[in-house]
Image (spheres, rainbow, N blue to C red):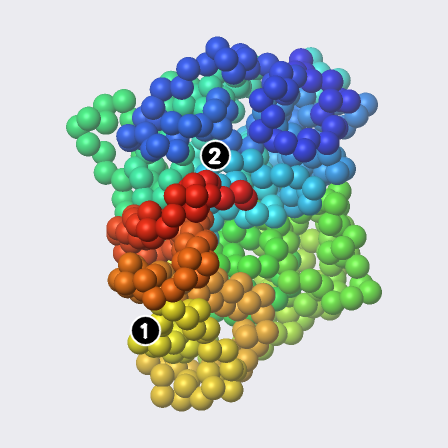
Amino acid sequence: MALQGPEELGEQVEEPEDLDDQDASSISPAEEITLPPGPGGDEEPEEALLLPWDRFSTWLHCICVVGFDLELGQAVEVRQRHPVWGWGGKTSICYLSFPDSNSGCLGDTQFCFRFRQGSNRKTSLGCFLENTDRDAPPCLKRDQGHYYGYVYFRQVRDKSLKRGYFQKSLLLISKLPYVTFFHSLLKIMAPEYFEKQEPCLEAACNDIDRWPSPHPGRILTLPIMGVVIKVRIPTSYDKPGTSQLVQSTQTDSQVSIVLPTIHEVDLFRCFYPVFFHIQMLWELVLLGEALVVMAPSPAESSDTVLALVSCISPLRYCSDFRPYFTIHDSEFKEYTTRTQAPPSVILGVTNPFFAKTLQHWPHIIRIGDMKQAGEMAKQMKVKKLKNLKTLDSKPGVYTAYKPYLNKDEEIIKQLQKGVQQKRPSPAQNAILRRYFLELTQSFIIPLERYVASLMPLQKSISPWKAPPQLRPFIQQDFMKTLEKAGPQLTSRLKGDWIGLYRNFLKSPNFDGWFRNRRREMTQKLEALHLEALCEEDLQQRIQQHSEVETVDLVLKLKDKLIQAEKEQLPVRPGTVAKLRAHIEAVILSLPEDLQGILHKPSTP
């Protein structure tokens, strides 16, 4: 039974947070719901102001059930909360929620996909989500332009159905890239749903709407359908390469599941079929090269794409990536055209049709069935693209790319030795993750050092002048620093590091990284300027100026105050309160008629 008719599902939704849309789900009306403080800790002041379903919206955008209809094909049967289509994306989401027919996925399968957000959609809870995003590490910040779809697909024989199979997917759509967490959540929700149907989803939605927000740094206990999950959301202040393990305590008698990570995939398992080429793959991802992963199932496709994206952590991958991509995707024509060079994107595909359609792509990774970590992988040479004719081609990496860095034989030997000695998979994963982290850090440290030198000296900051500007990034100057302060100080690898940097500086990953660093440094300059203003004796200064100049000063100080609060400038504790007190003291020194005007809140 569907909760909505097809014509309602296709409507354009301008305001996702529209709580008056009672047709949006079959859940109890908002006025009947009372929201207790979240179980993850004391309630934040801003959380106390959240409306019903706002808590739900900080975690999920909506929950859908996609079934197979003999006449319609894949179709949305049930939807809880806000739809995310309306621009023709519903059909694409339906196809993305099912494996390709050639995958032969019997039983239960989990995977994820990623799709574009409609350009005419508004973001709900924007200000609140900005606050929770502020302390998140780069890889866990919400993607403003895309949604993630997390799928639990079940296909079992059923003679009572005309098709002979029961085929259905439970789909969670979210802005959050918490892959491990949402897959764990689906393992709890989906089997219950397939047994008890819609009432079960209603109960799950009500549980989620009582969760605290996913604030970085907090350890959260999240009850869902009689099970309690305990997780910690990482922060940007965590030391890279370390995980703040969530420890069980004696008071956790109700906790059923403790998740050590919310987002990390098993790198070793994902790269195992091609781990002789991990260093080359790291370079391709770093440079934002067009990559396609051809895999036998959506689970292997999505895991491998996510592993590739995460291998350059803590650097954020700034190009597009699609863990599972189908011929029905709205970007199919855009990404398969031969009239221009392939875009900077990583695609994960399973349909054999792509072997022909994407044959012109420069780098193709063919993944066979993922073996258990106990089996030895055979060393495979990099193959020429012309040898790739169909998806039946042998597993391997098909490319003409020549790596800039010499191959690191030590990591290969270390991983091979682990396989021979039957080292546990989590240990192999930790070794590989540490290797990628150290490689990325060795690469990025010289860039961080040079960009830090672009910051003006603190003594050049005057409270009565505009904050100084950052010096420009000059490629030639940066390259000169590599001779004495390059990656050779921290990495044993030899090779053409200069060539690698030169290409990286042209990539979307550099552009995204530098934009973020420039914004952080500009905010730091604004914060230092604000602190300098707070140390000034404003009373003495206004005595030397006219009323008009004093009013002008108050308006400028108010603008600084608004900026500090809106952008969350990294000022010392008490600075904002001190500035507010300064503004009040200056206003009180003016005539009463001006005081009344200046005390009025400024209009946005």
Question: Does residue 125 appear in this view?
Answer: yes
Sequence-earlier tag: 2 or 1: 2
Answer with left or right where residue 405 lies relative to residue 328.
left
In the image, what residue type sits under mark 2?
A: Thr
Residue beneath label 1, please?
458
Quarter that holds the C terminus: top right
* Nearer-the-camera pick, 86 or 299: 86
Q: Position of residue 282 (x, y in %)?
A: 50, 66
In the image, what residue type sits under mark 1?
A: Gln
Residue beneath label 2, please?
58
Q: Quadrant of residue 208?
A: top left
Q: Nearer the viewer, mark 2 or mark 1?
A: 1
Above or below — where is 530 with respect to 12?
A: below
Which residue is at 35% across, 72% downward? 461
Question: Does residue 533 appear in this view?
Answer: no
* Nearer-the-camera pick, 587 or 473: 587
User: In what element is the residue under mark 2?
Assistant: helix
Which residue is at 38% across, 27% downward? 48
